[in-house]
Amino acid sequence: MKKILGLLIGSSLLGAAFLPMSAFAADKGMVLALSCASCHGTNGASPGSIPKIQGRTADYIEKAMLQFKAGERPATVMNRIAKGYTDEEIKLLSAYLGKFAPSK
């Protein structure tokens, strides 16, 4: 089992070496946004009382995250969470989540 897992990881890393740099940026936004899903639901479609992100534009999400980070927006935990991201990471995760906003 360990050999198979090692081969899978190794082949994934080898394959990643041939991807263009833009693929890494897109993947990084997705990976960063995965942590949002634990509270906000898959792709931001919160099933409960936590606000939905789905349907919000990338600009809206980025602005909100920067406001949380700066302490300019009321929050329970988002201010602490946002401080853990760089401005570039906020831009990447916002761009990813913004893909689920309706197009005009």
Image: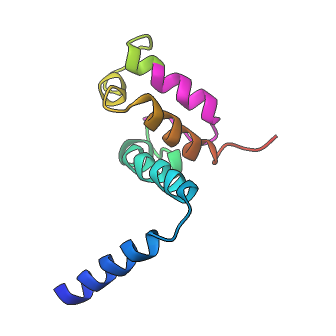
Residue drawn at x 47%, y 22% as measured from the top left: 66
The answer to which of 90 and 81 lies nearer the viewer is 90
Q: Does residue 96 appear left or right of residue 80 in this picture? A: right
Q: Is residue 33 magenta?
A: no
Q: Is residue 98 visible?
A: yes
Identify whether 70 is placed above or below 7.
above
Q: Position of residue 36 (x, y in %)?
A: 41, 43
Magenta highlight range: 50-66
Identify whether 15 is placed above or below 55.
below
Q: Is residue 53 magenta?
A: yes
Quarter of the image with the N terminus in it: bottom left
Quarter of the image with the C terminus in it: top right
Q: Is residue 1 visible?
A: no
Q: Position of residue 85 (x, y in %)?
A: 36, 33
The answer to which of 4 and 63 lies nearer the viewer is 4
Residue drawn at x 53%, y 56% as measured from the top left: 21
Query: Quadrant location of residue 71?
Result: top left
Q: Does residue 66 appear left or right of residue 95 in this picture? A: left
Extreme residue toward the right, this view: 104
Extreme residue toward the left, this view: 2
Residue drawn at x 61%, y 35% as measured from the top left: 58
